[in-house]
Image: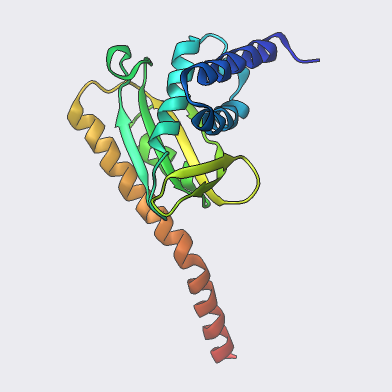
Amino acid sequence: MASRTEKQKNDLVNTVVDRIGSKMSDKKAVLAKAFAQGFFANVAADDLVMQDPDDLYGAAMSLFNFAAKRADGGILLRVFNPRREQHGWRSPHTIIEIVHDDMPFLVDSVTMELNRRGLAVHLVVHPVFSTSRNDKGRMTAVDVAGEGVRESHMHIEVDEQHDDAALRAIEVGLAASLGDNRAAVEDWEPMRGRLQDIITEIK
């Protein structure tokens, strides 16, 4: 039997999904509903039950809209403070949104960079979606399973930063960290192959 908090979480997610259906065209709503359900699927109920449904809707749709268009292999990254009058939702934290090809060590690389800057991480939402995009990079299908390119979508909440320069510095630092992570992951197999060649030559 689901716990009381799990039921509250399910009710909140259903409220968000219903709101999507009332605010979007049918075609876009199908995508957005699948995204929202995947977005919240692995978030602990305790992290959601005290939040305003408007802000949960805003957080999920902010990342959904940010991820809507992405070039093949490109990195989407932004750091901002959501304000209700500007973004339609709010958070007491600074928000980091990242869309990236799924690969090992992404969350580790990001959290290490944030820790290096002395920032407390309050929440990490990290769904991995199978996505399909058209030749312009526009998302046409999204699911937590199935066919498509595996993409990491990250919503991270850290201590609120009030200075634009601080927001920009976090963004620059994360971009560098993600670049280093990609280089390490993509170089791993060629390095391993070269090492095996050297071992063979020595033998």
Residue 176 picture location, percent across and down: 31, 49
Residue 148 shown left or right of residue 166 in the figure: right
Residue 64 picture location, percent across and down: 45, 32
Is the C terminus in the top left, top right, bottom left or bottom right quadrant?
bottom right
Instruction: Please name the residue shown 38% across and 25% down the image.
Output: 158
Instruction: Please name the residue shown 55% across and 42% down the image.
Output: 141
**Is 197 drawn above or below residue 65 in the view shown?**
below
Is the N terminus in the top left, top right, bottom left or bottom right quadrant?
top right
Instruction: Please name the residue shown 60% across and 28% down the image.
Output: 37
Does residue 122 appear in the picture of this structure? no
Instruction: Please name the residue shown 36% across and 48% down the image.
Output: 177
Which residue in the rendered view is the most extreme toward the right?
Answer: 1
**Is 36 drawn above or below residue 16 in the view shown?**
below
Residue 38 shown left or right of residue 117 in the figure: right
Which residue in the rendered view is the most extreme toward the front?
Answer: 26
Asked whether 12 or 139 is in front, the reply is 139
